[in-house]
Amino acid sequence: MTKFAIILGEPNSINSEILAKSSAIKKECIIIGSHDLLSKQLELLKIKRKINKIYDIKDYIRSKKKLNILDVPLNFKDAFNVNSKNSVNYLRKCFNIAHNLCLKKKIKGFINCPIDKQRFFKNKELGITEYLASKNKVLGSEVMIIYNKSLSVVPLTTHINLRKVPKIIKKNFIITKIRTLNNFYKKYFKVKPKIAILGLNPHNSEYNKDSEEIKFIKPAVNSLKKRFNVSGPYSADTAFGKAHLKKFNIIVGMYHDQVLAPYKTLYEFNAINMTLGLPYLRMTPDHGVAIDKKKLNISSARSLNNCIEVMSRLIK
């Protein structure tokens, strides 16, 4: 039985390279994407990997040595310079196939190799997290987590302009997100995670009575404490100190760079991006498409390997 899929992702990228280099590809895994694109890019990169082209999920061959690719046709002249319209239409087809296979219980989840969000969403303040949440009618309760077994981080707001954050950070919004987060850990990791919640403002606005900390964040934390292992709000400037990190499984921030900037300084790309709250598992490597490296054959499959290993563990 095929257990999960990997979407080949953005054509103009390092994706074919990291997929071919991956040492973690499982027998029960299929690739969703263009057979011709993958073959041509690997040929140009001078990477040898056996590929088995299939047209139905039932046709895959159980083998670690061969990449089983469920073919999604893509028109291109230059394998590393596919035009934007063809690329976006192709990616939407790939996501639709993976989504439908999950809903039909033919696979338990998927990993998507990175995409170019600017091309895919035409510069809108969106990411795949929001795209899939909307597709599954759970927009608002979904959670983006950057996961590492030592420490994970969650930005409660994701791909939005910073000036919009204070308008979104409300008590019920925080409670809904933390409930999704805790439920995921309980279901898949069988633990009640220790969660630290950060404030929004420098030094938590010294708890000024008109601050978001006093009006929304602290009341949310107090309510969550009754059911979950939650504490805060903590000041963000000290939250990533060594003594602090040992106390928690997850640090939850109010906006993207509040937690992602220090996290990537600590862990670089030794982490994966997961979307919680969907009816299936979805993960992606914690790096971009690396267009500047797409023809160089110098990229590492480390984050993709991490995705595959975590996915394999969670779907057992």
Image (cartoon, helix red, strand yellow):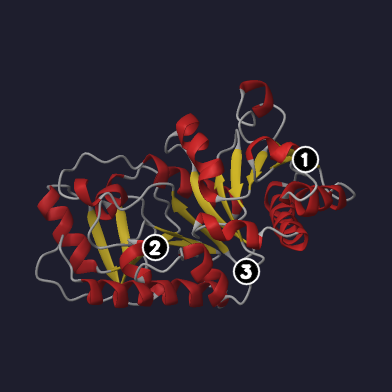
What residue lies at 38% left-to-right and 47% top-to-bottom?
287
**SS category of the residue bearing label 3:** loop
Reading the image, the residue beneath label 1 is 207
Residue at far top of view: 243
Q: Is residue 105 above or below residue 155?
A: below
What residue lies at 77% left-to-right and 54% top-to-bottom?
216
The image's mark for residue 143 is none
Question: For the residue carrying disc 2, how many other residues have a C-alpha within 10 Å: few (<14), some (14-19), or many (20+)?
Answer: many
Q: Nearer the viewer, residue 260 or 313?
A: 260
Reading the image, the residue beneath label 2 is 30
Reading the image, the residue beneath label 3 is 279
Please tell me in which quadrant of the rendered image residue 149 appears: top right
Question: For the residue carrying disc 1, how many other residues have a C-alpha within 10 Å: few (<14), some (14-19), or many (20+)?
Answer: some
Residue 2 makes an appearance in the image: no
Task: Give the residue type that dot 2 points to.
Answer: Ile
Q: Which mark's residue is nearer the viewer, 2 or 3?
A: 3
Task: Give the residue type that dot 1 points to.
Answer: Tyr
Q: Is residue 230 left or right of residue 135?
A: right
Task: Give the residue type that dot 3 points to.
Answer: Pro
Q: Is residue 227 left or right of residue 236?
A: right
Between disc 2 and disc 3, whose residue precedes? 2
List x then y, in percent, for residue 264. 46, 36
CB contact under 8 Å: marks 1 and 2: no
